[in-house]
Amino acid sequence: MKQISKTEILQRVRDAGVVGAGGAGFPTHVKYDAQVEVVVANGAECEPLIRTDRLTMQDRPREVVLGMLYAMAAVGARRGVIGLKKKYKDAIAALEEQIRLQGVADRVSLFKLDDFYPAGDEFILVREVLKRTIPEYGLPKNVGAVVSNVSTLVDVTFAVEDARPVTTRLVTVSGAVRRPSTFEVPVGAPFEKLIAAAGGPVVDAARLIVGGPMMGSLAPDFSGFVTKTTSNLLVLPGDHPVVLRRLRDRKRQLHLTRSACLKCMLCSELCPRNALGHALYPDRIMRSVAAGVTEDLTAYSGAYLCSECGLCATYACIMNLDPCAMNAELKILLAKGGVPRPREPRPTEARVFGDERHVPATRLIARLGLSPFDAPAKLAAFDQPLEFVSIPLRQHVGVPAEAQVRAGDAVVVGQVIGEIPKERLGARVHSSVFGQVREVTAEAVVIDVK
């Protein structure tokens, strides 16, 4: 590990455009501008069927451990803990060996989690690893922690040691494809190329979910592009329950709620946020909505606490209702109605038996009808030629990057093509290929590969 100051670490991470690779894409140089006592690395792989974190820890343990040490140096942490599942035997062995080689066993350790969903949710991870409960509307720093995905730590190591920007991404292609695989691909690579590299769909009328089966979004087709936060492309038959859930009409869900909700409270009993003591009761919200209580929108402000993990809809509700979708809709209504998300954290304590509410991942996979698709998806060579890439200028929390190139410009791998607007929250964007800029829009830079 290089001896380097906090200021220099933050600058190099900023210059490299590192963002949270776990999904949200929060700019890492901003997250690390903090003072906490512990860094928690998230290698728990929250969603079923995704393999990127496991393979990252297994194949790049040095970069994960060094990234942890740089993160600790940046935030002034005395210790670091890598949270991963007990079943990741190869990753555990690789990381333990690296911790020994780096001579940091007194500062960096592993925490081995059971295989449950949503173990990779940072609120749940912090509770499991540190036995601390992040308050309502709070952040890990409220309990003295910073959480970083293990892939983010790899990007941090490359940024600090090699000044290498984020230009590639590890993506799992799973589901109804001939060869479920994980590929390292340039940012901006077309989804259809990754699906082709996995052998293509094995069903007619296949649909694509970007992300995992619980929280991923249903794409209109296969025409999207990889970003810094893309972790999984899930191909499924068009009539699969995971797909059909995303095609439900929300107004019909309201009617079904009024007629079919049994008031059984199972949605609240299995809610991970409720288990942490947060005042989120999906059953109460469902009853209020069903009763037509809409005059006072503040009555629904608890919807802001929902992480949209989907357990209430896919595992808890025996009537096939969707409290998660209801909460998502209510968040929109609250924002439009002028009811802001509370900013002041509210300390809570985990409820009695809260730790016993874990949903085993294998049971969840079976409930979702995904057992036939639960394949290894090993790391494979990406063999598809790329004619072009489309690199979004916003792949992160904050404002879009400002384009630094014009149509016709020649670009090289690692060149800055999008800069952070002055004094705004954002992240740099770099070219992932050698080529010529075809088009620049407000949303993306399209580059023809040379």
Image (spheres, helix red, strand yellow):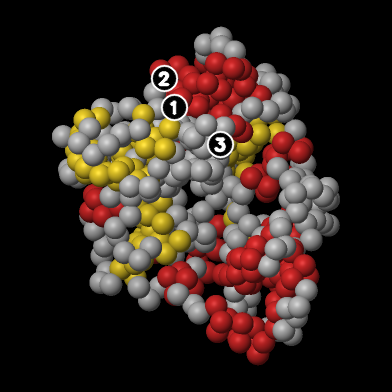
> Could you tell me how far apart the alpha carbons at marks 1 and 2 are, in whole angstroms?
7 Å
Location of residue 434 with respect to 238 vertically, above or below: above
Question: Mark 1 = which residue?
Answer: 16
Query: Badge 2 local density, few (<14 within 10 Å), some, or many (20+)?
Result: some
* Residue in the picture at 75% in, 60% down: 274
Q: Mark 1 and 2 residues: CB-CB less than 8 Å, in contact? A: yes
* Residue 159, x across and y down, in percent: 45, 23
Q: Secondary structure at mark 1?
A: loop
Nearer the observer, 146 or 163 = 163
* Residue in the picture at 79% in, 48% down: 344
The image shows a total of numbered marks equal to 3
Location of residue 390 with respect to 372 vertically, above or below: above
In the image: residue 340, left or right of residue 408:
right
Q: Nearer the viewer, mark 3 or mark 1?
A: 3
Question: Mark 2 = which residue?
Answer: 163
Mark closer to the chain start, 3 or 2: 2
Location of residue 87 with respect to 267 vertically, above or below: above
Location of residue 257 with respect to 161 vertically, above or below: below
Looking at the rendered structure, which numbered label has been put on residue 424?
3
* Residue 432, x across and y down, in percent: 30, 34
In the image: residue 277, left or right of residue 244:
right
> Could you tell me how far apart the alpha carbons at marks 3 and 2 are, in whole angstroms?
23 Å
* Residue 244, x across and y down, in percent: 44, 75
